[in-house]
Image (cartoon, coloured by chain):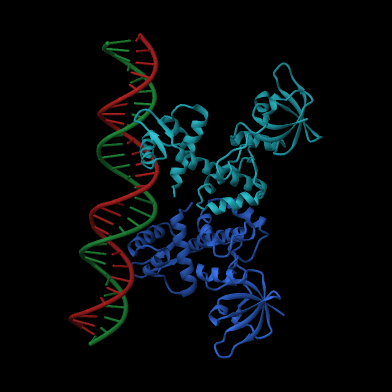
Chain colours: A cyan, B blue, C red, D green
Amino acid sequence: MYSFTEENYLKAIYKLQEQSSESINTNAIAIVIQTKAASVTDMIKKLSEKKLLNYEKYKGVVLTELGKKVAIETVRKHRLWETFLHNKLNFTWDAVHDIAEQLEHIQSQELIDKLDDFLGFPSHDPHGDPIPGKNGEMKESNFVVLSDLREGELGIISGVVNHSSLFLKHLESNELILGKRILVQVIVAFDNSFQVKIEGKKILQLSNEVARNILVKKMK
Amino acid sequence: MYSFTEENYLKAIYKLQEQSSESINTNAIAIVIQTKAASVTDMIKKLSEKKLLNYEKYKGVVLTELGKKVAIETVRKHRLWETFLHNKLNFTWDAVHDIAEQLEHIQSQELIDKLDDFLGFPSHDPHGDPIPGKNGEMKESNFVVLSDLREGELGIISGVVNHSSLFLKHLESNELILGKRILVQVIVAFDNSFQVKIEGKKILQLSNEVARNILVKKMK
DNA sequence: TAAACTTTTTAGATTAGTCTAAAAATATTT
DNA sequence: AAATATTTTTAGACTAATCTAAAAAGTTTA
């Protein structure tokens, strides 16, 4: 239906739109897609003709309902594939993204619905991002950042704010992986760093920067 | 590494080569790839420059060792994905091929090795075709066509000779599906049709044409 | 072996997506 | 508000893969 490239543009614009509320300008898209502004202008024209977005010269773009729908479907595919790769094939946190970038463009509605079923209709992907349902609806997630916990509080690692490979690899090498229980023992007043205990054994010292980028499900 | 299109050409040539032993001519490739001879000539030149096949004008092509390796890897990916779709996602026999045609081009060695592991290192795909191993080796299969069985003999449905969607749908609608036990009750001398019993209950009359296209694992 | 037919290749064009360089529009600074 | 800087668009070109139509090579037939 839509090409690999078209889907990528729609997904990029959708993500920019989620952050900003204003119409999205050419350069911002070029940076996300890793291409040149001239290429973006060309593609925008094409997507505009296909009624996937509204475009006014020099004024940026806004997705139409159709464009948004296609973008959300692509996000759904991406996150379901990430979940598959992590939960079923045991890929580490940092490895799933690049492969899911390819898998998200496989064309088959039946495939994605059966995959969803096979995975048990997960509500969040391995990075803690919500997975849109068949009709595009997303569950509000109740995750908080680790830095929001107080001394003595317990959380379950559920995702990340920063998705960079560097950060994810850092977490994994410190056993800070999805599903682990994490207890805040001490918050150091001087630098707001966190002393935490992972699943009853390992004690770690986390900078506030790290604590601000880990999502946890707060336990009572 | 190699493009979607390059992999498809190599796979097509590999399959033709398996059947014929002679060098493969342009038109034969055009028919398999569903394109025009002129397009095949263009692509052949490109693959030849990349040392994936040996090409002499007007004399057809032969895959190099490298070309064969890439083709076999693609076949491996295709058959592993078909197995995944059938065994894990419950796709019917006839539905797996088209989706696997897309999935086989996902680039990630790690993905395919982990998938292989997840599936339990299967030796055959749902059509009874052998799945090449990590180093390209294929297990000799001991399947026979149903029409080779004699009256009173028992087999387990293990694959098909004819892969057409029409045939596969016909089998599925008659409960002739992978893994079912099939007992030959009577072979009609007049037309060599087969009266068979599926898993203790259903009795079916199969034409010789059908019996020649079902692969079974013969039981003692 | 020459004529007729078939297959393959070449030449030139097309489409999707990209690029560079220059022009045009918009935004910012003074 | 003019000058300057930034952003965006246009123009023209490139690559990969394809196509049609015509030319060339190879094969079959009489």
Q: In this view, does A11 lie above or below C16?
A: above
In this orientation, which residue lies closer to the viewer: D9 or B206? B206
Instruction: Tell me if residue B115 comes above or below residue B213 in the rendering.
Output: above
- How far from the left and from the top, in percent, is residue A65? 46, 38
Picture residue at 67% right of the left edge, 48% below the top: A120
The image quadrant of residue C2 is bottom left
Whether A26 is drawn above or below B196: the answer is above
Residue B71 in sight: yes
> Can the viewer see residue B134 in this picture?
no
Q: Within the image, what quadrant is residue B211 found in? A: bottom right
Relative to A82, A45 lies left or right: left
Residue furthest right as drawn: A200
For the image shown, how many numbered marks are present on the structure?
0
On the image, the x and y values in percent for residue B56 come to 36, 67
- In the image, is residue A104 above or below residue A146? below
**In the image, is C20 to the left or to the right of B121?**
left
Q: Residue at x 55, y 54 (%)?
A: A110
- Which residue does the image show at 67% across and 47% down from the upper left? A87
The answer to which quarter of the image holds residue D2 is: top left
Tell whether A86 sits left or right of B209: right
| Residue closest to the eye, B45 or A209 | A209
Percent x, y for residue A151? 77, 23
